[in-house]
Amino acid sequence: MRDGTVWDGATAFAALDPAPDRADGAVAVRLIASVVLIRDAASALVDALAAAGVPAIDVADELVRSEARARGWTGPLRAPLRAPLTAPLGPTSPVDVAAAVDALMPGATVARRGFGRSALSVRAMTDDGLRLRVKVPDRPDVVPELMAAGLETAFAIRRRFGRMASGVRGITIDDGAGGMDDHRTLGSAQSQTGTFFLDTSLACADSIDAQRRRMAGRRGVSAATPKPWFPIDGVVAHEYWHNLDTTVVASPAVYLELNRALGAELGVETYEHALRGREPNAPPVWQQALARIVTEVSPYATTNWRESTAELFKLWWCPPPDGVPSPLVRCFGAVLDRFYPAPE
């Protein structure tokens, strides 16, 4: 590393952007090379930062944070990480996943439940009495911070929407998100079981590495969550909506108001008209509205009403750092706040 830049041979790999307003001296790590940040690269980057004496890093990348924590860097969930006083080169010994998740979740207790041959089962309970069970493959690349983030997001949504969100009782992390083992489906909700299924590429370092290699820098069709949120936060929020939207659909006044308000924001009669914008004889105003959904939400949000509102909920729940989401996402959140106000 030289002149505030991390180099890979003759290639400038990442820039360190100081944050003058941070008392801890944390720097943001910004990639400046067109590379896929796989696990080996994340490991080498953390080693370079440690060797250069960087005191703290403010970074959201899952693999960089996982490699840093494995080398003794510490910090709260989603917050900047501080370097250890004596930074080892290379990862430290494996950690107790349940204990590590517990340490990242003040106000909750996370403990292992039993012992299985291939799966790790934990139970999480908050101080205000909320409970969730989590099942994940029992393997050394499980990232405790990502498990903690998924749990925290699920608990926060449960707390925000009360009994309306009480149908979710567990999260299972496996290959294929409960379906085909192709890693194309990152999450699925099975309301009859009260369980979310999440793909291992949301919580296991080797699977994240493999997914990044498969994607080779291509963007997915679903909305990406901005820093400091992780992909697992967004997928949990998206799948939780599939539990919440049953109440919305069963409430004609809410369903109609949501359709009309989103439609009005887009300049059409209802949101469903916008979703029909690719029909052969769709009026130009429908086509323009559909284009805004792609731009302000995601291509996947044009699939159907349920998936579209789940994508809106994801971006509303995981706002950008400045707290100002797109106009369409703000409109969606305003309707939810009106019909389902936050508890006092």
Image (cartoon, rainbow, N blue to C red):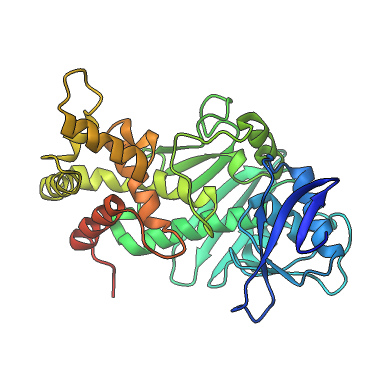
Q: Residue at x 45, y 43 (%)?
A: 195
Residue 46 falls in which quadrant of the image?
Answer: bottom right
Q: In which quadrant will I find the C terminus?
A: bottom left
Between 57 and 146, the one lying in front of the other is 57
- Report whether 205 appears left or right of 146: right
Image coords of residue 297 (percent x, y): 36, 44
Image coords of residue 180 (percent x, y): 54, 24
In the figure, 146 relative to 181: above or below?
below
Q: In which quadrant will I find the N terminus?
A: bottom right
The answer to whether any part of residue 160 appears in the image is yes
In the figure, 341 relative to 311: above or below?
below
Q: Residue at x 49, y 72 (%)?
A: 127
Image coords of residue 17 (percent x, y): 66, 65
- Report whether 280 appears left or right of 19: left
Q: Residue at x 64, y 32 (%)?
A: 216
Q: Looking at this rendering, what residue extends furthest in the top direction?
A: 280
Q: Count of labels shown?
A: 0
- Report whether 338 appears left or right of 48: left
Image coords of residue 25 (percent x, y): 69, 76
In the figure, 137 relative to 102: above or below?
above
In the figure, 308 relative to 21: above or below?
above
The answer to whether any part of residue 114 appears in the image is no
